[in-house]
Every structure is written in structure tokens, then in C-alpha cells.
Amino acid sequence: MKPICLKLKNKLSGQEAGFSLIEVLIAMAVLSIGLLSIAAMQTSAIKGNAKSNHLTQRTFTAATHIEYLLNIPFTHPDLTDGAHTQTIDGDTYTWTVTTPADRPNERIISLTLTNTYYGENRTLTMNTKRVRNQ
């Protein structure tokens, strides 16, 4: 098979091959806009990931406190009817315990975790029910 060779001729008369300066500048502008858009998307993605990580940590922390409330003795002061508040490492846990009138062996617990994330107050609420083992 015969190799294909391209020969470029440089003609100084009439038509010259290449790009003009304005074409190069327009191409650079389009490329710059594209790269800046990608950088903005990356920044937005990083912020979104950080927010999601913080939400996951708060959810785990609240679930841990719910587990604490489910595993303490049924007569513990933290399970008496009413509102209870505790602050640990800057996180404020507020839980309300309610005993239904017709079911004295049951506690309905509503836990709210409040903390500050980049200057914004964030709250997370979890609800559960605890029944005394007979």
C-alpha cells in the first residue's frame, strides 16, 4: 500500500492558510467562558457535598441520641412527660416526651437537634415511640 503524503503549499499570492487574530481571540473567549462555567459548577458541587456531609453527621448524631433515649430505663428522668433540653458540643438537643392517656406503658418522643452551620441555624427533627416491655 502506498503511503499518503499531504503536501501543503504556501502561496504568498492571494490565499494564505491560517487563522486571523480575531478568530483566535474569539476562540479564546469561548474557551474561557466554558472553563469559567466548569469552575463555577465545581465550586457549587463542593458546597453541596459539604452540606450533605453536615446533614449526614447531624442525622447520625440525632439518631444516636434517640438510641440513648430508647435504651435508658423506662422510669429515667429523661423520659418523664414534658420538654427536655441538653447541649453537647454546641448542638442543642430538645426532646418532648408524651405519654398517651390510654397507654401508660408508651412514650412518644419528638427530638429536635439545633446547631449552627456557617452562620445559619439548622434544625433536624426525629420522632419515635417507646413501649415498656412487659
Image (spheres, helix red, strand yellow):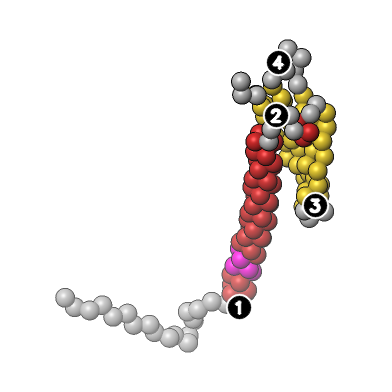
Residue carrying label 3: 90
Q: Look at 78% across and 50% down and name the residue there.
A: 88
- Of discs 4 and 1, which sits in the foreground? 4
Residue 133 is drawn in which quadrant? top right
Q: Tell me where residue 111 appears, x and y as whole percent.
A: 74, 35
Q: Nearer the viewer, mark 3 or mark 4?
A: 4
Q: Inspect the magenta stretch and tell me whether residue 34 lies in it.
A: yes
Q: Which of marks 1 and 2 is nearer the N terminus?
A: 1
Instruction: Name the residue that disc number 2 marks.
Output: 74
Nearest the viewer among 118 and 13 is: 118
Residue 50: x %, y % from top left: 66, 55
Circle 1 residue: 21
Image height of 82 relative to 27, above or below: above
Q: Residue under circle 4?
A: 103
Whether residue 72 is visible to the viewer of this picture, yes or no, is: yes
Tell me the magenta residue range.
29-35
